[in-house]
Amino acid sequence: QVQFVESGGGSVQPGGSLRLSCAASGSIFNIYVMGWYRQAPGKEFEREFVARISWSGGSTNYADSVKGRFTISRDNAKNTVLLQMNSLKPADTAVYYCYVGILGRQNYWGQGTQVTVSS
């Protein structure tokens, strides 16, 4: 199957920065996209799209709420996706989940990493 190593979460004050990393390994062939969703406290049944990046051309998409503050990038050789988060707000507090989309198969999800933005 697919295994993930997520890192970079933590606690930061408003206006601060964090960088999330997610490395996928295992039975992964023909990746076409990697990205991030998040789940805020009290919203156990709502996972919100954050950003994604195509694996071949590197095109990116962002949620309106993070445009201009977050930057997604990838390292194809390491099957790794990064999320640089700047100007963080309390509303960004959530568990962040990375995922990988593989052609002809389901999406696979990481275990999640907590991001807390608080003064």
Image: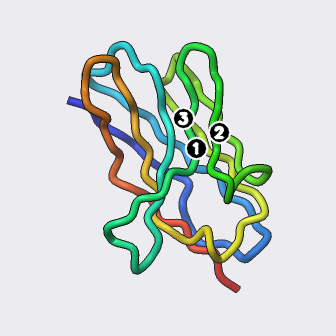
Q: Could you tell me how far apart the alpha carbons at marks 2 and 1 are, in whole angstroms?
A: 7 Å
Indicate the amino acid at tag 2: Ile
Q: Circle 3 sits on which residue?
A: 81
Question: Image point 63% across, 37% down: which residue?
Answer: 61
**Residue 72: mark:** 2
Judge depth for marks 2 and 3 and give the one in front: 2
- Of the pair 97 and 54, the residue shown nearer to us: 54
Residue 78, percent across and down? 50, 23
Residue 95, percent across and down? 45, 64
Residue at the limit of the structure toward the bottom, as seen here: 119
Q: Quadrant of residue 88?
A: bottom right
* Tags 2 and 3 touching, CB below 8 Å: yes
Residue 110, percent across and down? 35, 46
| Picture quarter with the N terminus | top left
Indicate the amino acid at tag 3: Val
Question: Image point 37% across, 13% down: which residue?
Answer: 30
Q: Quadrant of residue 29?
A: top left
- Of the pair 106 and 26, the residue shown nearer to us: 106
**SS of the residue under disc 2:** strand
Relative to 88, 25 lies left or right:
left
Q: Earlier in the sequence, mark 2 or mark 1?
A: 1
Residue 70, relative to residue 15: is it above or below?
above
Residue 30, relative to residue 9: is it above or below?
above
* Tags 3 and 1 touching, CB below 8 Å: no
Q: Circle 1 sits on which residue?
A: 51
